[in-house]
Amino acid sequence: MPVTVLADYPIIFPLNESRRRFAVSSGFGIRMHPVRKKRVLHAGVDIAAPYGTPVHASGNGKVVEARYSSSYGWYVEIRHAGGFSTLYAHLSKLYVKKGNVVRMGRRIGNVGHTGIATGNHLHFELRKNGKPQNPLQWVILRDSRYKKSH
């Protein structure tokens, strides 16, 4: 049986807060969709950040998707230990491909506004056994300067 270490779980914030503060522009939960104008589950958090800001894997894992979709735009999905998966969407550039094994902290893409997006941001989802979770209740913020805008 393989040994699982803490880095195998998605525990770190995907943007590097040591350089600047980032704000959650849309939280997890039911919300009015800003484009479709319907109340829907927002299955992740939107983190406002400048175009091109590096996005990092929040834990060790395997890239199970790295492609374009009409809603997410360019996105990466990573499968982690313990039934966890993370999704990073609206990216302007991808640095990984489907099938890649990534380590915690590896740059996987850049912030953008592809797909259905109203501006530059990272849409970050975390799932446990396929069920959406609030990522901010799971990840460890690497810098206490992080702030929440809502």
Image (cartoon, rainbow, N blue to C red):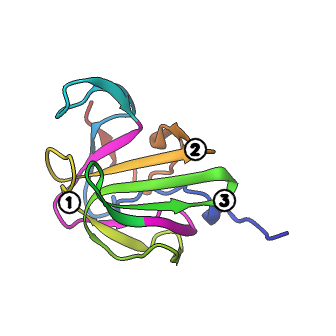
Tell which tag, 2 or 3, sits nearer the viewer: 2
The amino acid pointed to by label 1 is Gly
- Give how far across and how far down residue 81 sits, in percent: 66, 59
- Give how far across and how far down residue 82 sits, in percent: 69, 53
Q: Secondary structure at mark 2?
A: loop
Q: Quadrant of the N terminus?
A: bottom right
Q: Secondary structure at mark 1?
A: loop
Q: Nearer the viewer, residue 125 or 142?
A: 125
Mark 1 and mark 3: Cα distance apart in space: 28 Å
Identify the residue position indicated by label 2 in the image: 130
Tell which tag, 1 or 2, sits nearer the viewer: 2
Identify the residue position indicated by label 3 in the image: 81
Residue depicted at 61% across the width and 65% down the height: 7
Residue depicted at 44% across the width and 57% down the height: 142
Task: Identify the mark nearer the N-term, 2 or 3.
Answer: 3
Identify the residue position indicated by label 1 in the image: 112
Magenta stretch? 43-65
